Image: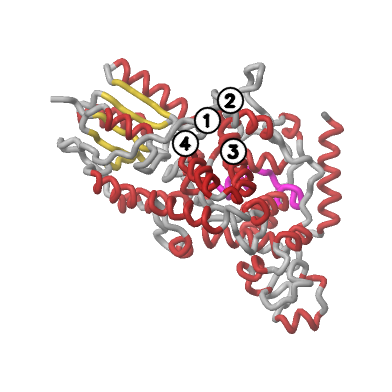
Amino acid sequence: MTSPAIVWLRQDLRIADNPALTAAVASKRPLVVAFVLDDETPEKWRLGGASRWWLHHSLQALNRDLKAKGVTLVLRRGRSDAVMLDLVRETGAGAVFWNRCYEPHAIARDRALKQSLATQGVEVESFNGALMHEPWEVKTKSGAPFKVFTPFWRACLQVEMRGLVATPKRINGWNGEVASDDLAEWKLLPTRRNWAKGFDRRWTPGEAGALEVLGAFIDEHLKAYADGRDLLGEDATSHLSPHLHFGEISPVQVRRSVETAVMHEPALQRGADKFLTELGWRDFSTNLLFHWSSLPEANWRAEFDAFAWRDDDAAFVAWTKGQTGYPVVDAGMRELWATGYMHNRARMIVASFLIKHLLIDWRRGEAWFWDTLVDADLANNAASWQWVAGSGADASPYFRIFNPVTQGERYDGDGAYVRRWVPELAKLDEEFIHQPWEASADVLAKAGVALGKTYPEPIVEHAGARARALAAFAALRAED
C-alpha cells in the first residue's frame, strides 16, 4: 500500500495555484490535508484578534472547497513542528509538502522540521506559493539584498516570475482514520462582545471571495487606480490584502489577471502599472524581513535606538479610539476598529500622527495594527511602520510630517470619509470638516457639534507638535 502524503497548509488557504497541493496530487499518493493553529512558535506574534476572525471563516470556506474535491481538512492545534511529527507518525506518511513562509520563527521551525523528517526517511518538498519572487532571487549586482524599493522593483521586472500551476480536478484523500479538531472549539471568534459584527458585512473570507474581489477591482477601479487609490472617500483600492496574506489568492494569480486585463483593454495600463508596483511592495517587505529578521522589533537604522520616545498612555488610548480631535485621523482609526481594515492613505496619516505628533514609539502602533487588522502581515506591518518612522529601509525622511488637516482636505475634499466614520461631524460644512475648531460657535451649534463634549478638542496642536518632532529628530541626527 502506498503511504500517504501530508499537505501542510499555512498561509496558502486555497486550491488554485497552490504549488504544494498540486505537487502532492501529482505524487499519486493519497493525501492528508492539514492546518495547524500554532500559538506557541510565533510567541508574541501569535495571530491577533482580527486575524483570528478571518482565519475561522477562511478555514470554513477552505474545508467546503476541499470536500468538493474529495478530501476533508484536518485541523490540529499546538506547536506545529510537534503536531506535524505526530501526524506523520499517526498516518505513516512518506512525504510532506508545504509552501514556504518567511517569518523568522517559521524559517527556523521549517528548517529544523525538514531535517527531523529527513532522518526518518520522510520526503519533504517546499515551494513558493506566497510571493512573485523569492527573497534570494532578486539581488543587487554585487549579490546583496536590495534596501531601496525602486531598484528592487526594477530588478523584479527583469526576473521571470513562476508560472501558474494547475488546479487539481480531484484530490485523492487518504482513507485511514485521522483525528481532527472542531473549528468551533478553537474559539477564534469573539466570545463576549461581538466587536467583529461589522466584519461580516464587509468581508467574505475564502478563495471564492478573493476571486470576486479581484474581479470587481479590475472591472471597477483598475483603470483609475493611479489617481483614485489615494482618495479616501472613493476607496478605490483593491481590498485584496487580507486575501493575499492568508493565501486565498496568490500574487501570481493577481498579477496574471491584471496583465490579461490590460491585453484586452490597453487603457488599463497606467492603473495596472501603479497597482503592480504596490503589489511589489509586498515582496519588498518580505525581502527586508527575510534578510533582516529583527525588523519587527528593532530599528533597522540603529541610530534610532537613541530616539527620545514619549510614554503617553492617555494620548495612545485616544489614538486607538479615534478620539484625537483630528477628524481624518479619527476616521481612519474608527474604520479600523469597525472593519478590521484601513485605507492605505489613512494608514500613513494615522501612523505619522502617532509617531511624529505624539512621539510614541512605532512599535506600539505596530502592535495595535497587528491585533486589529484582518490583513496583519509581519513583514508589511513592520516595514511600513518603520518607513513612516524614518527608522527603516528606504524610509520616509524625518522631516516629512503629515499635516492631518491638509491631508484630509487633499484626499477627502468633500469630507465623505470623515462623515462616514465620524458621524458626529457629519453636518459640518466642507470648510470645517477637517478642522472643526476653526468653526464659529454658531456654525458648530447648527451642526450639532460641541467641541470637548460631542467631539474632542485636538489632543495636540499641529504646529507645536511638528516643531517638537523636528527638534527631536534633529537631536538624533546631531548625535549620529
Above or below residue 3? Residue 59 is below
| Foreground of the two, 357 or 281 | 281
CA gap between label 1 and label 3 equals 9 Å
Q: Do the residues labelled 4 and 1 touch (CB within 8 Å)?
A: no
Give the crowd class for mark 1: few <14, some 14-19, many >=20 residues within 10 Å.
many
CA gap between label 4 and label 3 equals 12 Å
Q: Determine the residue positioned at 74% across, 70% down.
A: 433
Q: Which mark is residue 138?
A: 2
Dot 2: what SS? Answer: loop
Dot 4: what SS? Answer: loop
Image coords of residue 246 (percent x, y): 44, 44
Dot 1: what SS? Answer: loop
Give the labeled residue for mark 3. 280
CA gap between label 4 and label 2 equals 15 Å
Looking at the rendering, the stretch of residues picked out in magenta corresponds to: 354-370
Q: Are marks 1 and 2 in contact (CB under 8 Å)?
A: yes
The answer to if 358 sits in the magenta stretch is: yes
Q: Determine the residue positioned at 66% across, 69% down.
A: 416
Give the labeled residue for mark 4. 130
Q: Residue 133 carries which label?
A: 1
Give the crowd class for mark 2: few <14, some 14-19, many >=20 residues within 10 Å.
many
The quarter of the rendered structure image containing the C terminus is top right
Image coords of residue 54 (percent x, y): 43, 52
The quarter of the rendered structure image containing the N terminus is top left
Q: Residue 247 carries which label?
A: none
N-terminal-most mark, 2 or 3: 2
Image coords of residue 377 (percent x, y): 53, 42
